[in-house]
């Protein structure tokens, strides 16, 4: 059985289709909530467990960037890659704008934004958002919170907290400029699914903690896909997360996103609000 099929099979088990394996990964949570009523559409797994937000933190960073004026539209600022920037993916070694930042999940662009903001302003936004544990200290003794807190470090968030934050985003309850919501929706657009659902979201890949809590376990990836879906007058927000139980060659967030999107129309059309 291929890696993608095994991973998808596990996600189908998480979605209640009776398949238990996650390709060596343990499903963490799938949570879908009606943004208008607050009713739970679907919930399964350990949705209160906090893990690193990884690249899903780009959703709040996009809102902050547009609200603060650092980001101006879908293509500005376009920043050139410079030697010394984090570039674990070859696609990051080029000029990056807000759209390609989200599409290619470019870490160094996030770090340029947070460095420009400074620690006090970034902390004020995270506190206003009520985002996870709000801890931007970074790695102990490293003084690196401004560029590392959301990357397998001090900042942690649960699927329930992700969904609560996203509900505030789609309901425009964060006290931000209208442009911040509009532009963030544009650059996080994923596309239209069967059934007419327009999806916006961001995947993320990080690592689970070592059993002794001393740091990230580089053999166990954490995968995320979070966002919202709109059809006609209805909007739902969602968070899906899983943790690999063994080393895998591909990014957990990408695998999870693909499998989740394949199941999302069925879950939205067949699961009534309030279904456990």
Image: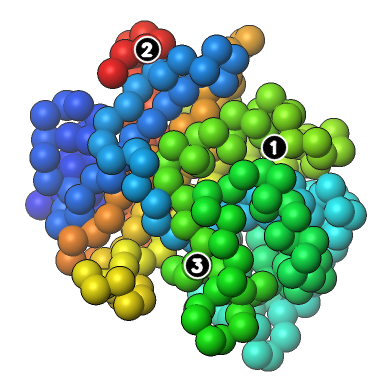
Measure how far apart labels 2 and 3 are at the Cα level.
33 Å
Mark with earlier residue (2, 3): 3
Give the crowd class for mark 2: few <14, some 14-19, many >=20 residues within 10 Å: few
Packing grade of label 3 (10 A; few <14, some 14-19, many >=20) is some
Horizontal and vertical percent for residue 131?
Answer: 59, 48
Marks 2 and 3: CB-CB under 8 Å? no
Could you tell whether 172 is left or right of 267 in the image? right
Q: Mark 3 points at which residue?
A: 154
- Seen as rendered, the residue at the extreme bottom is 83
Is residue 48 visible in this depiction of the protein? Answer: yes
- In the picture of the structure, the residue carrying the numbered disc 1 is 185
User: From mark 2 to mark 1, how far is it between C-alphas?
Assistant: 26 Å
Tell me which residue sits at (72%, 80%) in the image.
Answer: 81
Seen at 73% across and 30% down, the residue is 173
Q: Is mark 3 on a helix, strand or loop?
A: loop
The circle drawn on residue 93 is none
Residue 262 higher or lower than 245, as above or below? above
Which label lies toward us, 1 or 3?
A: 3
Q: Name the residue under label 2.
A: 274
């Amino acid at each position: 059985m291929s890696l993608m099929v095994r991973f998808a099979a596990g996600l189908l088990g998480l979605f209640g289709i009776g398949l238990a394996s996650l390709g060596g990964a343990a499903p963490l949570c799938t949570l879908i909530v009606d943004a208008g009523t607050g009713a739970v559409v679907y919930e399964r797994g350990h949705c209160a467990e906090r893990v690193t937000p990884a690249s899903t933190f780009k959703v709040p960073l996009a809102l902050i960037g547009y609200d603060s004026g650092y980001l101006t539209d879908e293509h500005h600022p376009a920043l050139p890659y410079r030697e010394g920037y984090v570039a674990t993916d070859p696609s990051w070694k080029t000029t990056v704008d807000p759209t390609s930042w989200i599409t290619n999940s470019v870490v160094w662009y996030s770090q340029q934004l947070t460095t420009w903001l400074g620690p006090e302003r970034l902390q004020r936004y995270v506190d206003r958002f009520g985002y996870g544990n709000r801890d931007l200290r970074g790695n102990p003794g490293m003084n690196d919170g401004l560029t590392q807190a959301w990357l397998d470090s001090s900042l942690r968030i649960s699927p329930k907290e992700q969904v609560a934050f996203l509900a505030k985003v789609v309901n425009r309850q964060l006290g931000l400029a209208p442009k911040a919501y509009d532009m963030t929706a544009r650059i996080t657009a994923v596309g239209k699914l069967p059934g007419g659902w327009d999806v916006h979201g961001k995947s993320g890949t990080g690592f689970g903690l070592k059993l002794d809590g001393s740091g990230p376990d580089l053999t166990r990836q954490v995968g995320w896909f979070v966002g919202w879906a709109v059809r006609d007058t209805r909007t739902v927000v969602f968070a899906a997360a899983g943790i690999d139980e063994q080393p895998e060659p591909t990014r957990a967030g990408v695998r999870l996103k693909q499998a989740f999107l394949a199941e999302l129309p069925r879950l939205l059309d067949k699961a009534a609000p309030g279904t456990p």
